[in-house]
Every structure is written in C-alpha cells, then in structure tokens.
Image (spheres, rainbow, N blue to C red):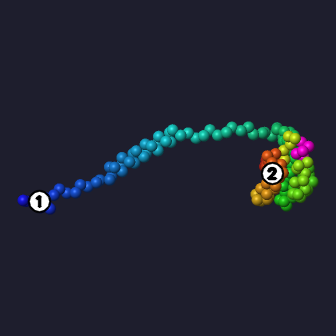
Amino acid sequence: MRFKSQNNLAPIPRIDLIPMLNVMMAVLAFFVLISMLLTTAPDGVEVQLPGPEDGEVSDQLERDFFLVRLTATQQGIVNEEPFTQEQILTQIPNYLATVPDGVVVLVAEPDVPYEVVIQWLAAMKTIGGDRVSLGIEPMEQ
C-alpha cells in the first residue's frame, strides 16, 4: 500500500475577510439610512404664551390664590407681611377651609437654594395636599 506524501496535499484554503467586511458595511449603511428615513422628529407641544397685554390676568390670579413668596433669607411673605414657616403653615388650613376651590402657591426668589424650596413645599403639601403647588414669576427684562 502506498501512502501519499505530505508534499502533494493541497494547500489549506484561506479565508479572505475583506469582501465579507465590505458586504457587512454595505448592509449596515443600508439599515442606518432606512432607520433615519423612517423616524421623524416629534412635532412638540404647541403652547400659547401670554403676551404683555395679558397683565391683568396675572393680577386676578394673585387674588384668587394664597400666594407665599419665599425670600433669600428663608422667610415667607404673605400679603406683603413677613411670616415664619410655622406661622404660614398654620394659616394654610384656615385658607383652604374658607375657600373650597383655593390653591396655595409657593413662589421662591431665584437666590433661594433648591433644597430650601423643596423643604417648604413638602411641609406645605403635608397640610394642603394636592392643593399646594410651586409657582414661578416671569423674569424681568
């Protein structure tokens, strides 16, 4: 019996990765292009902002709310009179009992730390529940 010599065997086949990578990149580019064409940017929400002629509306809103202004010295102001947090917290149940549709609004100055604002708001919400809210004032130009 005769054996073939090792020299006569065919060479080991080589795998060429370049054409395979070219095909994969073309497929990837195709899917990226299709996904970009099929997705659209959200339209957003249309909001009607009040103009300068609507100033009288904000004056009416201030009269309908129990407005608490929080100063940088961490003191509350109600009807232009300064109060401590405890005094304001005792006034809130009286207001909510007398005005059934009333809402308590906390408006803080920009210099007040967020932590203080959240503490005041949390204390007010424990008394007033969902009838307490955080308000903002427009920035002066």
Label at residue 4? 1
Taking the image as shown, residue 56 lies to the left or right of residue 42, namely right
| Distance (Cα) linking label 1 and label 2 | 93 Å
Residue neighbourhood size for the residue with mark 1, other residues' Cα within 10 Å, grouped as few (<14), some (14–19), many (≥20): few
Q: Position of residue 106 (x, y in %)?
A: 82, 51
Say which element carries label 1.
loop
Q: Which residues are magenta?
A: 95-99
User: Residue reaching furthest left?
Assistant: 1
Which residue is at 88% across, 45% downward?
96
Q: Give the residue at mark 2.
A: 125
Q: Position of residue 92 (x, y in %)?
A: 88, 50
Taking the image as shown, residue 28 lies to the left or right of residue 106, namely left
Q: Amino acid at mark 1?
A: Lys
Q: Amino acid at mark 2?
A: Lys
Q: Hey, which quadrant is residue 3 in on the image?
A: bottom left
The answer to whether residue 107 of the structure is visible from this angle is: no
Q: Position of residue 41 (x, y in %)?
A: 58, 41
Which residue is at 43% across, 42% downward?
30
In reply to whether residue 7 is colored magenta, the answer given is: no
User: Residue reaching furthest front?
Assistant: 1
